[in-house]
Image (spheres, grey):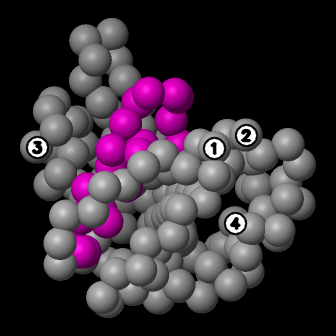
Amino acid sequence: MKDDFKINLNCLNDTQELAKKIAKVIKPNTFISLRGKLGVGKTTLVSYIINSLSQKKIKVLSPTFSIVNIYNLKSIRIWHYDLYRLNDKTEIFNLDYELALMECVIVEWPEIISEYLPRKRIDILINEDENFIRNVTVKRIGKI
């Protein structure tokens, strides 16, 4: 996977191919932040990433209400956070955030905890244009 790139997602197959590229670089201490408006496909991308790493089909649910879902895969544990409903940024520490950082963390709505984001991470921004085409920018921050 290149350090920085942009891609258009015209269909779910494109999203799945992007997920496969991202899944190839996931290892312990990987942090992925996902930004984008409601309904733009953040959780769908996470689902494809997790299923790319899994030996079997896993139903990945949005952690909007639970705030965090943990997926114990054969090769790695993934902590999937959705911080949309977080009232105070320090609440993240009540959700085993420090423990999660030793494994793989994927965070939707990371701007809520911007000061607690690791310096080494993958930032993904998903936007949608007027034709419902998703424009994705992927950036590696720091040496991963």
Pointer 3 residue? 13
Q: Position of residue 128 (x, y in %)?
A: 37, 24
State the SS at label 1. Answer: loop
Looking at the image, can residue 140 be seen? yes
Q: Residue at x 32, y 33 (%)?
A: 135
Q: Residue shown at 88%/60% (left/top)? A: 90
Closer to us: mark 4 or mark 2?
2
Q: Main secondary structure of the magenta part?
A: helix
Nearest to N terminus: mark 2 or mark 3:
3
Q: Residue at x 14, y 43 (%)?
A: 14
Asked whether disc 2 touches disc 1, contact meaning CB atoms under 8 Å apart, the reply is yes
Which disc is residue 65 wearing? Answer: 1
**Badge 2: residue crowd in 10 Å (few <14, some 14–19, many ≥20):** few
For the record, the magenta segment spans: 35-54
C-alpha gap between disc 4 and disc 3: 30 Å
The kind of residue tagged 3 is Asn
x and y percent of residue 25 in the render?
31, 78
Mark closer to the chain start, 1 or 3: 3
Outermost residue, left side:
13
Residue at x 31% of width, y 55% of height = 59
Quarter in which the N terminus is drawn = bottom left
- Residue assigned mark 2: 85
- The secondary element bearing badge 2 is classed as loop
Name the amino acid type tagged 4. Answer: Leu
Secondary structure under tag 3 reads helix
Circle 3 packing at 10 Å, graded few (<14), some (14-19), many (20+), is few
